[in-house]
Image: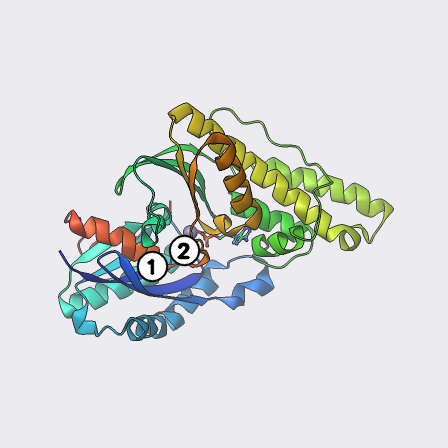
């Protein structure tokens, strides 16, 4: 069954549109919102307004890049949640209006499910069942994926997400937002010589809120003796923070793989762009005999390509939604 889907993603601060034909991404355009940098985090009101300004140009660009006319679109997909409600409303309303005007079916997509299914935008595609560590600015989950639309969260964070841990730690170091990629860059030039305690959390769950507190106390003590401590040790501090977060993530993933006996292991979400995590996954994979799956950078952070891929599998099952589908925050 051939179908060309226009997909819209607007859950946080990236406005994205993609054209996906039969599960193959033809275009994947993203408008990043620079406006949040000055505030050190995403300001929901600012995000909604920027989505409103970006959405039509981004959709036009996606259609143009894919060389697809509006009339060739067979379904419209959108992120329904989780995310910021004001942001989601912009993408949802746009998708509904587009579908209504061309009398097209609508497909609603769960953002977290789409991060997992981003793996099907590329080759090699993981076979079922596989485990996926989904690590983003808002979520940290270990997902047992039985089929395209059949997945269970078997572990998750009890407080901060991994991306949040990167961003909040970076803020303490005076780095801009989002700090994750900046920490990654500095870490590559540093060595992890400041050991921060790894939280001990039972089962397959995570906790990252204590890390930021221990970094805060550590910095306070060091800065009292040397006001230039951060500047003089920035690379090593970043390497230490990254190593702590990555170690926690990889150890839990190993626990999940041993517990379930599953040997196909993937990572997804914005933090899966982290060079330390990518290397650590490969190293652990070699040790434990896993086949590992790491997405291309364009499918790590928020993008509509993954929404279109997820929508394709829902389309095949006839899972459509009505014009009354409302966004959800969590
Ligand atoms: O998936 P995503 O784009 O948005 C959410 O759904 O939250 O993830 C954004 C998160 C941010 O916290 C950002 O700092 C983090 O992903 N991130 C990284 C890297 N690139 C993005 N964290 C560590 N290293 C990176 N290279
Ligand atoms: Zn995301």
The quarter of the image holding the N terminus is bottom left
Near mark 2 (Cα within 10 A), the count class, few <14, some 14-19 or many ≥20, is many
Residue 262 horizontal/vertical position (percent):
37, 30
Query: Residue 314 or 15: which is nearer the viewer?
Result: 314
Asked whether residue 325 appears in the rendered view, the answer is: no
Residue 243 percent across, percent down from the top left: 62, 41
Asked whether disc 1 touches disc 2, contact meaning CB atoms under 8 Å apart, the reply is: yes
Q: Residue at x 25, y 53 (%)?
A: 311
Name the residue nearer the viewer: 46 or 68: 68
Residue under label 1, please give it: 305
Give coordinates of residue 72: x percent, y percent. 17, 70
Vertical position of residue 200 compared to residue 282: above or below: above
What is the spatial separation of the Cα atoms under label 1 and label 2, in whole angstroms?
7 Å
Determine the image quadrant of residue 25: bottom left
Secondary structure type for disc 2: helix
* Left or right relative to 223: residue 134: left
The quadrant of the picture occupied by the C terminus is: top left
Please tell me whether residue 320 is drawn above or below residue 209 in the rendered image.
Answer: below
Callout 1: helix, strand or loop?
Answer: helix
> Crowdedness of circle 1 by 10 Å Cα count: few (<14), some, many (20+)?
many
Is disc 1's CB within 8 Å of ligand 2? no
Q: Give the quadrant of residue 175.
A: bottom right
* Residue beneath the point at 26% across and 43% down: 148
Percent of width and height locating residue 271: 50, 49
In the picture of the structure, the residue carrying the numbered disc 2 is 299
Counting residues from the N terminus, which is met first, the one under dot 1 or under dot 2?
A: 2
Queried on whether the Cβ of the residue with tag 2 lies below 8 angstroms from ligand 1, the answer reads no
């Amino acid at each position: 069954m051939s179908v060309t889907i226009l997909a819209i993603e607007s859950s946080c601060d990236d406005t994205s549109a993609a054209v996906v034909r039969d599960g193959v991404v033809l275009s994947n355009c993203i408008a990043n919102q620079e406006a949040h940098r000055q505030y050190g985090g995403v300001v929901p009101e600012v995000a909604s307004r920027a989505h409103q300004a970006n959405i039509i140009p981004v959709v036009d660009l996606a259609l143009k890049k894919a060389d697809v006319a509006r009339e060739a679109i067979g379904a419209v997909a959108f992120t329904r949640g989780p995310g910021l409600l004001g942001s989601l409303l912009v993408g949802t309303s746009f998708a509904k209006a587009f579908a209504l005007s061309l009398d097209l079916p609508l497909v609603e997509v769960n953002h977290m499910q789409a991060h997992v299914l981003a793996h099907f935008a590329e080759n090699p595609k993981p076979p079922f069942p596989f485990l996926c560590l989904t690590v983003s600015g808002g979520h940290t989950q270990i997902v047992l994926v039985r089929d395209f639309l059949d997945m269970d969260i078997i572990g998750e964070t009890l407080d901060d997400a991994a991306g949040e841990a990167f961003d909040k730690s970076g803020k303490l170091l005076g780095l801009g937002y989002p700090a994750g990629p900046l920490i990654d860059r500095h870490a590559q030039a540093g060595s992890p010589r400041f050991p921060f305690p790894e939280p001990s959390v039972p089962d397959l769950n995570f906790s990252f809120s204590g890390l930021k507190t221990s970094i805060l106390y550590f910095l306070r003590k060091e800065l009292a003796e040397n006001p230039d401590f951060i500047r003089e040790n920035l690379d090593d501090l970043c390497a230490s923070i990254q190593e702590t977060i990555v170690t926690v993530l990889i150890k839990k993933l190993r626990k999940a793989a041993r517990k379930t006996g599953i040997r196909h292991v993937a990572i997804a979400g914005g933090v899966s762009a982290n060079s330390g995590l990518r290397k650590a996954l490969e190293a652990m994979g070699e040790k434990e005999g896993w086949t590992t799956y790491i997405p291309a950078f364009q499918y790590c952070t928020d993008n509509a390509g993954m929404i279109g891929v997820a929508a394709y599998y829902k389309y095949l099952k006839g899972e459509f939604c009505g014009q009354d589908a409302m966004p959800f925050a969590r």
